[in-house]
Amino acid sequence: MVENYLNSIRENASALFDEAIEQLKGYLRIPTISAQDSAIPETVSHVVSMIENIGGETKVLDDLGGNPVVYGYFTAGENGDKEKTLLFYNHYDVQPPEPLEEWNTDPFNPTVIDGKLFARGASDNKGDLVARLTAIKVLQNVDGGLPCNIKFLIEGEEEIGSPNLAPYLHKYKDLFKADACIWEFGGKDEKDRISMVAGIKGMAYLELTCVGAEIDMHSSVGAYVDNAAWRLIHALGTMKNANNDILVEGFYDGIAEPTESEMEAVKKIPFSSKAVSSLYGLKRPLITEAKGVDPREAMVFHPTMTICGLESGYTGKGAKTVLPKSAKAKVDCRLVPGQDPNHILSCVQAHLEKHGFSDVKAEMINGQKAYRSDYDHPFVAHVLQTAEETYQAEVVLAPNSAGTGPMYEFGKQLQLPIVSTGIGWVESKAHAPNESIRLKDFEQGVVHMAYMLSGLSTALNH
């Protein structure tokens, strides 16, 4: 019976496939770059049309600043459960495509090569939105229509840290009220296992700046003038040692201990040091080897402090003998549940003061808290089970992602379980040149979302 129903969904998805890919291509042609304030109104209008064209209701929320938030709503069909609602979270903005010279195709001219669709936003996150809307169309073709109510929250600032989303969630929490939420991303690993998460790490993204003079100087004055670049490097050197231990006092305050079920889940996550090394072309061993730590536990349960970029002086071709007037570093701290980004900033500022670097200024660029769903919630089990039945492959569900997003605000305001799954693959290259999805993964993702929705009410009533 289950297999017959699943085959019916597959047939409907296959019939809609070509139309869905053309719709996705049209969406991908819009250069919706939030960091550059590019094509926001056009994209909002396009998203609204996609929802309304298949019978959904929409509202464009733009009264609280930032790029508009799009609300979408589909009511349950005649045989559906109007007491149950699933919320989809997506974003319509994409990363800047630079460096353009590293793309093999035009990033905003979607191109299919060998069963892969290349374009900026294909995997992050425009492809997932179109797959979810296509799943709704699939279910509309089934007797009885949609099995539950479906809502969408589609924002336009995820790629710049969702700085204006929290006020919208607070003001409109009744509008977005739901029983469970499917988050924006997910995909397959190097062995085509389905990778999903039930939470996300937080972030304290800091900028550290050291100013030593009003102008750059000839490097010969380094005999008696302090160097802002060296000064910043020395300051950074006090924050993390050669064993990659974070030395900032108070950095680990408040960390919530993982539950037994979360620990067991992490032990089941497949991980190959060799595969990771090959994927990224690593030149040094994993830092967890020296620390004697399981990389899977580190990825899920441990906070990080990463220097993302350093800027100072002359870095062009050839030589320029200069003593830089200033130096700047971008530092990304990935946080786990219990940590507060503002507390992290205060700890870093106190650390710099304590170690004699009061002239090095630290400020927050982006701060978000971590979030984990209740790993034992029936919704989590339902998404896992339907994925196994849809893909007929191993499914890995981790307590949280190593990456970051605004999931904490959803959990805080809406009080619901969240699982993230999507249509990406191991070489999707989100945020990098030559971003892509595989067409077969798109179609399978449509089937999974439709099948997952069809059994949602029963799962939530258990």
Image: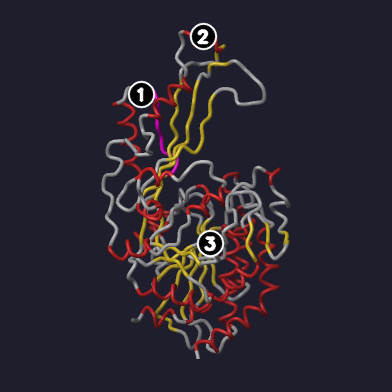
Q: Mark 2 or mark 1, which has the lower sequence index?
A: 2
N-terminal label among 2 and 3: 3
For the residue marked with disc 1, what is the amino acid?
Answer: Phe
152 versus 385 height, above or below: above
In which quarter of the view is residue 190 placed? bottom right
> Disc 2 versus disc 1: distance between alpha carbons?
22 Å
Residue 65 image point, x, y percent: 48, 49
**Dot in front, 3 or 1:** 3
Question: Hey, what amino acid is under mark 3?
Answer: Asp
Instruction: Tell me which residue sits at (73%, 56%) in the image.
Output: 109
Quarter of the image holding residue 174? bottom left
Q: Are marks 3 and 1 in contact (CB under 8 Å)?
A: no
- Magenta residues, dominant SS class: strand
For mark 1, give the secondary structure. Answer: loop
Q: Residues within 10 Å of mark 1 (few under 14, many from 20)?
A: some
Q: Which mark is residue 189?
A: 3
What residue do we see at 62% from left, 59% from top? 122
- Specify the label residue 221 is tagged with: 2
Pointer 2: residues within 10 angstroms few (<14), some, or many (20+)?
few
| Residue on which the image places disc 1 | 357
Kind of residue indicated by mark 2: Val
Q: Is residue 172 above or below residue 389?
A: above
Give the magenta part as a residue range.
359-366
